[in-house]
Image: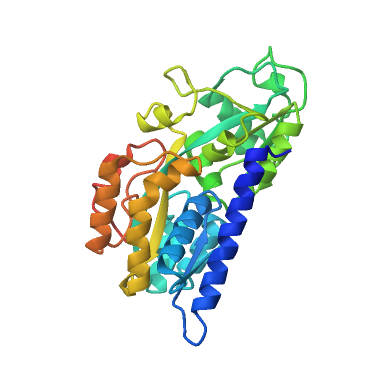
């Protein structure tokens, strides 16, 4: 059940969205209103939606923005065909997607907007797990575990002889790609016999109801459901670390912390309304990230992102290096590649 505060938050968001729609409709009569189309990650969606609502209100209906949720992989299929202006991504663009963009003549500007921490969670009814190692997570999730590792005590003998119920992102999600790369060592390498969903709220509901469940979620979804879920410290070789704003910012929560990104179509960026929106987004991204439960980037990274966008720097800085666990301040300084 949602808390009263959560209900009021959702109600306020709905009212704001209705007001934006009314302003757009009222001001757009008799003329064409420029449209900016955005799609992609459900994880990045709350930040982008907030940025879009703020911008539309400031523009008083002179510009309209749509924000879809196709998942990072599904969104890139549209983006690389030139069907959308901006792509929300919870992981960097993949080699196959880069090739698709090349084939369709789509250049892009890669811009980080926030940090996330992939959070390992269990039900509040789980009383036996107080920490987990990266190696134990790998034994749970690697492809060879399918139909073989099915009980808690197979991971650690002192844990219950009870079903291990796993919950995680669907295979079209950037969260899935990043988690499998960070934990298993290869993107998309995962057992298939787990409860998968592109909707993180569905995962929250499934995990909180099952005493024997374990899953992974974006940090914001855990933070908004702490009364129903418990985060598990992860030991990646330097002792168990809980995800938090502090451990993400100082780099202690590796390799499960990650950058959240937007990609802007190079041709779309030449349109004044897209340029203005992206500038507005980068200016407000730190505040908006905090408001929706993510970790803002260091000010220097936002400044560099804005400079790269104004210089119309094209390509990805993640082409030569894996994303998992690398300091973002070092990555954004690299030369991009198409």
Q: Quadrant of the image for the N terminus? A: top right
Whole-percent x, y for residue 213 in the image: 71, 30
Q: Residue at x 58, y 39 (%)?
A: 221
Up-down: is 110 above or below 107? above
Whole-percent x, y for residue 324 in the image: 42, 39
Up-down: is 271 above or below 157? below
Up-down: is 204 above or below 88? above
Q: Residue at x 46, y 61 (%)?
A: 52
**Residue closer to the observer: 147 or 33:** 33
Q: Quadrant of the image for the C terminus? A: bottom left
Image-based side of 165 in relation to 242, left or right: right
Q: Residue at x 41, y 56 (%)?
A: 262
Q: Residue at x 52, y 59 (%)?
A: 40
**Residue closer to the observer: 10 or 125:** 10
Whole-percent x, y for residue 71 in the image: 56, 56
Up-down: is 150 above or below 102? above
**Residue closer to the observer: 320 or 16:** 16
The answer to which image quadrant residue 85 occupies is bottom left
């Amino acid at each position: 059940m949602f808390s009263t505060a959560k209900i009021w938050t959702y109600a306020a968001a709905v009212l704001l969205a209705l007001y934006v729609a009314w302003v757009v409709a009222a001001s757009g009569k008799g003329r064409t209103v420029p449209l900016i189309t955005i799609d992609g990650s459900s994880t990045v969606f709350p930040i982008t939606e907030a940025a879009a609502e703020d911008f539309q209100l400031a523009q008083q209906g002179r510009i309209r923005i749509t924000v879809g949720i196709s998942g990072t992989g599904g969104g890139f299929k549209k983006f690389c065909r030139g069907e959308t202006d901006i792509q929300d991504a919870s992981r960097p663009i993949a080699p196959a997607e880069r090739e698709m963009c090349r084939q369709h003549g789509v250049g892009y500007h890669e811009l980080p907007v926030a940090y996330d921490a992939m959070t390992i969670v269990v039900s509040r009814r789980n009383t036996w797990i107080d920490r987990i190692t990266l190696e134990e997570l790998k034994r749970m999730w690697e492809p060879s575990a399918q139909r073989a590792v099915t009980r808690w005590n197979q991971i650690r003998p002192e844990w219950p002889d009870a079903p291990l119920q796993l919950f995680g992102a669907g295979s079209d999600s950037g969260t899935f790609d990043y988690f499998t790369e960070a934990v298993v060592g290869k993107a998309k390498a995962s057992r298939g016999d787990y409860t998968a969903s592109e909707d993180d709220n569905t995962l929250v509901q499934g995990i909180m109801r099952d005493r024997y469940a374990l899953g992974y979620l974006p940090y914001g979804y855990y933070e908004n459901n702490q009364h129903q879920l418990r985060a598990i410290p992860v030991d990646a070789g330097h002792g168990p670390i809980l995800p938090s704003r502090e451990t993400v910012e100082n780099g202690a929560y590796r390799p499960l912390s990650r950058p959240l990104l937007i990609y802007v179509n190079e041709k779309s960026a030449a349109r004044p309304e897209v340029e203005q929106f992206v500038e507005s987004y980068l200016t407000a991204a730190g505040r908006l990230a905090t408001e929706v439960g993510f970790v803002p980037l260091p000010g220097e990274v936002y400044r560099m992102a804005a400079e790269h966008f104004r210089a119309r720097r094209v390509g990805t800085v993640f082409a030569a290096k894996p994303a998992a666990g690398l300091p973002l301040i070092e990555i954004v300084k690299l030369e991009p590649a198409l």
